[in-house]
Amino acid sequence: MIQDRSKGWWEEYRGTVPDGILENAELEKTSREFMLWVLTHMPGVCQTLSYAAAVFGRVIPPLPRHELETRTAFRMQRKADLRRDPKPVTFFIYESVLRTRFGGAEILREQLASLLDDSELPWMTIRVVPFDIDTFPGAVESLTYAFGAVPELDTVERESSHSTEHLDAISELTSYRYIFDRIESVALNETGSRDLIHKIARTL
């Protein structure tokens, strides 16, 4: 497994993008399945080129132009790689993500249309957590739960504005599986999620 990881396409970007971003690609590639909970922006592997550039464009302090372009290109390669070698993925998206206009209304409209297309892929599940749930699910940071080849290799990636942490202790994994269970229990089903995405897109 270690030898396979050292040969990943992301190694071409070593030294030009932060290690945490490289680890995102590695985690997605080496897992057999993964699920995300996002609160601020669309899942990276669902982003359009314009939307990704707008997301990186709001980084503080601002990125130099060449670095912004490199990170955007890296994100697009992550997206393409997953589509060449798909695996089961589930995205739980908080409603605020669907309404935040990175880059403006036109870019968001294009992004929502792309998200709807993604929702029809047989291996991708997109479910929205709406504003009007009775209680917030309990996770206030973006999370990735990656299922390893065996349960002992499961990993949680916890992302904040300052850093990215990777957690694999049994107690931590148990806690985050419970959090994802809560998120799933309040999320709209796939049809309801598509309906809400359509509704929001029509307001732009």
Image (cartoon, rainbow, N blue to C red):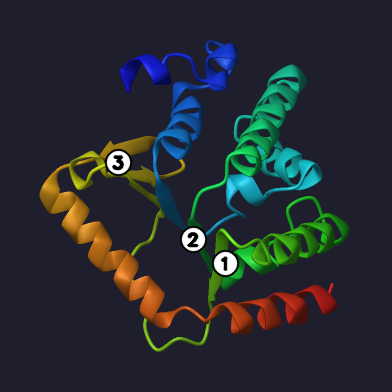
Q: Earlier in the sequence, mark 1 or mark 2?
A: 2
Q: How many marks overall?
A: 3
Residue under circle 2?
A: 90
Q: Position of residue 95 (x, y in %)?
A: 58, 72
Does residue 38 appear anywhere in the picture? no
Q: Which residue appears at 24% of the width and 67% of the height?
A: 178
Marks 1 and 2 sit apart, C-alpha to C-alpha, by 6 Å
Q: Position of residue 97 (x, y in %)?
A: 61, 63
Does residue 1 appear anywhere in the picture? yes
4 left or right of 188? left
Q: Amino acid at mark 2?
A: Thr
Q: Amino acid at mark 1?
A: Ile
- Which mark, by number, is residue 102? none
Relative to 76, say whether 64 is above or below: above
Which residue extends farthest left?
A: 171
Image quadrant occupied by the C terminus: bottom right
Q: Quadrant of residue 197?
A: bottom right
Residue under circle 1?
A: 126
Q: Amino acid at mark 3?
A: Ala
Q: Are marks 1 and 2 in contact (CB under 8 Å)?
A: yes
Residue under circle 3?
A: 149
Front-lying residue, 143 or 99? 143
